[in-house]
Amino acid sequence: MLRIQNVEVIYSDVILVLKGVGLEVPANRIVALLGANGAGKTTTLKAISGVLRTELGEVTDGSIEFEGTRIDGMNPEEIVRLGVVQVMEGRRLFEHLTVEENLLVGAYLRKDKEGILRDLEKAHGYFPRLKDLGRRTSGYLSGGERQMLVMGRALMADPKTMLLDEPSMGLSPIMVKEIFRVIQTINEQEGVSILLVEQNARIALGISERAYVMENGRIVLDGPSEKLIENADIKEFYLGLSDKGKRRSYRDVKHYRRRKRWLG
Amino acid sequence: MNELVQLIVLGLMEGGLYAMVAAAIVLVFKSTHVVSLAHGQLMAFGALAFWFVLVKLDMPVPVAVILALAFSAMLGWTTERFAMRPLIGQPLFAAFLTTFAVFLMMDGIFQLMLKGESVSFAAHLPKGNVMMMGVSLPITQLVSFGSCLVLFLGLALFFRYTKVGLGMRATAEDHQLAQSTGITVRSIFSHIWVLSAVVATIGGVSLANVMDIYYPLPYLGIKGLIVALVGGLESLTGALLAGLLLGILENVSAGYLDPVVGGGVKEVAAYVLLLLVLLIKPYGLLGLVRIERI
Ligand SMILES: Nc1ncnc2c1ncn2[C@@H]1O[C@H](COP(=O)(O)OP(=O)(O)OP(=O)(O)O)[C@@H](O)[C@H]1O
Ligand SMILES: [Mg+2]
């Protein structure tokens, strides 16, 4: 179980970005985190994985716990060792390394040679394309292949929890479907819990059990995903549907944002 | 004709020496993005340590090699731990200036220890000449060139086949991403300084094998930096190519032009090469090619 309570994050000592965020990711579950651009979703993931400090960001209040251990303040490699692995936004690869080398970097902390080989097989099982591309320089991969590679790399760490940042960004609908199918399979077969940050609310709510909506550094809405799908605001803001099932103009959406801000 | 061959071969050998010093600088730059001036001193101190064990303590060559390398590893570790690490997260320019400060400080110690004298260990190593390709070559040069080739081969294998090598290459590409995959970037920095100090020492000992250890030795680090720049700062192959190129250029140009202009050509050849290469290829001969998909 990953539990975040009342977390506040400040960049460069002055920029307050998270203003008391709380959420929970129970073991073996998929939890979605939605929100507009700049709401602080990526910052939340970075606070969990500990890479915030390389950007002069700091958790200044609240706590982050994984399986009962406080992890805020730990180094990123210690957090990976505990089993929490972030797949960063934008599908960042080690572009000059081959596909296989990228996968092996994912297992950098591990010493069990056999386990690593087994997990390499497993990653190839989830993404057969990666096996064919093994010796290819990864910088030349397509967007879909990159997404497979970054997820395969995260699997190589033998994680208990994966933090996925916008896996669907810029992918074709078919590829999005495929990626989300694999996310679901990984969750079911490996028992890996997943915190999923997405702009594609429909598909994220479709596979998650619970969802949180973030705005301006705060959680403004949360609940079981099937309830949120029914929620009128979510419908308007993310799915672009009004009560009557019609598309609404951006002005109405803005109206929703103002209201939320005022309430929050 | 024979004279030209002689000049080229000697140039190659000398170029190998520059290449080793450049390699040490490239290693640090690739992983930490810091341009280091300190390596001229790391190289000179390594050579001095080798001389001390071999001549002063009168130990056999293998012992001197091992002790000198161990000493330089320690020196590299210390430099990283106490001079560079406190600057992680600060502007790279601050780190660059710190390497200059380290250079100056170590230069003081180096000159103090030598007291203006020059020392040499060549007398304790095999001497003589061998004929190769119709050119007469000093054994010392051949040994130095041999260590250069072995060193570059060793580095290539190290980066390709070891785990730490893989971690270093990953770190070289993206510090934050490397951290997020569980690599301890700090310890990679430390390893890389140790490795580069060892490489610099192998270069320094090889250099001191063909020239004496005296006050200008550390300043050959500047030449190493020029070679690294010509090669592209990020590429070991580039460092090797640029080193060999400079060695040949220096010797050939000096061989033909010195009688005409009255000497000194060797001293400027490096700077002319640097200017020319950077004019044509601003990122150096083998500067990192950004991967761009079309
Ligand atoms: N290193 C940083 N220094 C200062 N401010 C930052 C830094 N990183 C992010 N921010 C700011 O924090 C806010 C939240 O950014 P974050 O990347 O977490 O948003 P996000 O919800 O992931 O948005 P998107 O959907 O566009 O990815 C933004 O206003 C951003 O400008
Ligand atoms: Mg984001």
Image: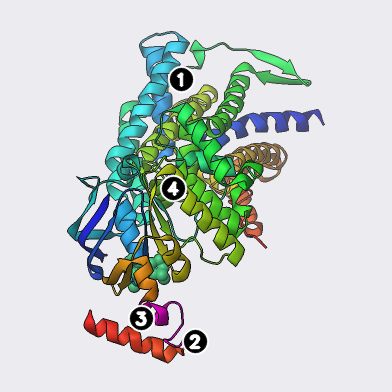
Q: Which residue is mark 2?
A: A247
Residue type, label 4: Glu
- Residue drawn at x 32%, y 50% as measured from the top left: B88
From the viewer's side, name the closer residue of B133 and B65. Answer: B65
Residue B257 vertical placement versus B141 (above, below): below
Helix, strand or loop at mark 3: helix
Q: Which residue is mark 1?
A: B120
The answer to whether residue B195 is magenta is no
What numbered label is drawn on residue A233?
A: 3
What segment is highlighted magenta in the picture?
Answer: A231-244
- Residue drawn at x 32%, y 44% as measured from the top left: B84
Name the subunit of mark 1: B
Give coordinates of residue B284: x percent, y percent.
Answer: 60, 52
Earlier in the chain: of badge 3 and badge 2, it is 3
Q: Quadrant of residue A215?
A: bottom left
Judge if badges 4 and 2 mark residues of a common chain.
yes
Task: Give ligand 1's quarter of the image.
Answer: bottom left
User: Is B84 on the left or on the right of A158, as rendered?
Assistant: left
- Callout 4: 10 Å neighbours few (<14), some, many (20+)? some
Name the subunit of mark 2: A
